[in-house]
Structures are given as structure tokens and as C-alpha cells.
Amino acid sequence: MKLEACEVTKRYGNFLALNGATFQTGDAARVVALLGPSGGGKSTLLRVLGGLLLPESGEVRQDGLVLPHTEDGALKVLRQNGFVFQGYNLFPHLSALQNVTLPLTQVHGQTAQQAHERAVELLTRLGLAGHFHKRPAELSGGQQQRAAIARALAPKPRLLLLDEPTSALDPVMTGEVLDVIRELAEGGQQIVLATHEISFARKVADWVVFLANGRVEESCLTASFFNEPSSSLAKTYLTGLSKYR
Ligand code: ADP
């Protein structure tokens, strides 16, 4: 895929979270990592790229197609994409299985039988066989996040958008979830990932978009970013990260 943002701005109240963010990936990016310091705008950009937030101005394109600027238009794009956020956003009163089937029947028009088969297939693939009937509170954090990934994948999204999917997890659970994401990437799933897991991004992403202060400071192949960052902000960021590793 090719992802592009052109002069995208987004404000929360008076605060300019995206300030003319502009980038374009290569034509065949498969896993795009949004990196940068906290508060830089990664999460906001991820939501704009997936159609979850409308920008105030500017434009986003997926494979040359402009994301619609109207709420109805953006909703169509949104339904083709899958989102996973940092906290677990599972419905607390539903089982893991129901969490996956509900959007399939309610939003994507599948029959109960189709939704059930798809949910069983995905939960099994993500290592949750035997946990179908547990509610989120009865699952570990890693299991909850894997169920959230299953739910996002169930409608076969064009793009899977992951916003700091491991930041609420301990190291073991982080490893479990990163393994799942790596397998999806290796299987060809198109992914946009906002993350602080730098070594993971280095291994799995093929394109890096580095944001700070609401602006894209670098957009380049992953190897170029890590081997020869060009902006001073990216150099400082990478040096700061390597200090305690
Ligand atoms: P990042 O993901 O890089 O940490 P975010 O996109 O979450 O950055 O946030 C960018 C800036 O916008 C931050 O300073 C944050 O405090 C602010 N922000 C994010 N969401 C909101 C919101 N709903 N209301 C007010 N400010 C927000």
C-alpha cells in the first residue's frame, strides 16, 4: 500500500495536535510504524489515517484514494479498517467469542453462523481456544489484547491500525502480542502501528514515520531511519532510547 498525508491539521480545543503533518510512504509499504516522543501526535495521526477522526484541514490518501471528508464517507472507510487500542476495548459483559461475533452480525451483516465460524477460527489462531466463553475480566491482559486483535481482524480489514497495543502489558504479555502482530505482518496483513517498541518496529516495519510536535520529521525506509536518521529530533530520540539498553 501507499499511505499519504498532506498538510493534515487537527486541534483539541486550542491545542494543535497535528500541525501540517505531511508524509508519503513508498508504493509497497506493508507495515508502517509511527514513532516519536509521547504527545507528538502518533495516536491522532493513526486515527486520521484510519478514518476514525476527521482532520480539520489537509488530506489523507490510501493507494491514491482520498479519504472522504464527510462523516458518512469516513464511516465507510472506517468499516474497512480494524483498530486495536492500548487499553483493552472489549465489551466487558460479553464473552471473548461474543466480542468477535457482535460487530460481524451488527455492523458487517454476517449471519450468526458465519460470525461464529469466523470468531472460532480467529480466536483459535490467536491462541485463545479454550477461552471462548470467558469474559474480559477472566482473561489475562495479553489474552484480552489478542481477543481485541481477533475482533479487529474478523471482518478482514484492508488496514489494521494498532495504537500502542502493548503499552498496558507486562513484558511476557507484550511478547505474546508482538508475536501475533509479527505473524500477521508476515502473512501479508497491511498494518499501521503507533508504538514505543522500537526494536520490534525495527524488525517488523518496512516504513517509519517519525512525528514530534504534531509534525512529521522523517518518513523513510526503516533501515534508513535507524541507520542514518537525518533530523536532529530523531537522532536525539534514538540516542535517548539506546541509553538504557
Ligand atoms: P502521541 O500518540 O504521540 O502520544 P497524541 O496524538 O495522543 O500523541 O496526542 C498529541 C497531543 O494532543 C498531546 O499533547 C495530547 O495531550 C493531546 N491530546 C490528545 N488527545 C486529546 C484530547 N482528546 N483532548 C485534548 N488533548 C488531546
Image: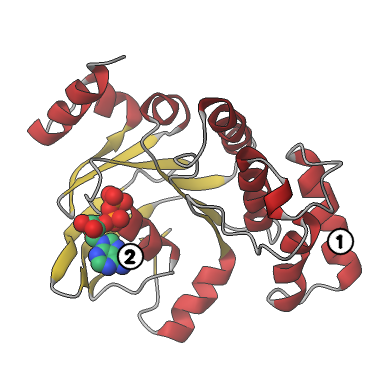
Q: CA distance from mark 1 to mark 2?
A: 35 Å
Residue contact between numbered discs 1 and 2, judged by CB atoms under 8 Å: no
Compared to residue 17, the image places residue 26 above or below, namely above
* Farthest front residue in view: 137
Looking at the image, residue 86 sits to the left or right of residue 154; the answer is left
Q: Is residue 80 left or right of residue 216?
A: right
As displayed, is residue 113 above or below residue 145? below
Residue appearing at x 26%, y 29% in the figure: 225
Dot 1, crowdedness within 10 Å: few (<14), some or many (≥20)?
A: some
Q: Position of residue 178 (x, y in %)?
A: 55, 32
Q: In front: 130, or 79?
A: 130
The residue labelled by disc 1 is 116
Which element type, helix, strand or loop, lies under badge 2?
A: strand
In front: 234, or 98? 98
Q: Which one is earlier in the sequence, the residue at label 1 or at label 2?
A: 2
Q: Is residue 29 visible?
A: no
- Residue extending farthest to the left is 232
Q: Is residue 132 above or below residue 180?
A: below
Locate ligand 1 by image quadrant. Answer: bottom left
Tag 2 residue: 60
| Image depth: mark 1 or mark 2 in front | 1
Q: Kindly identify the amino acid type of the residue bearing the numbered disc 2.
A: Val
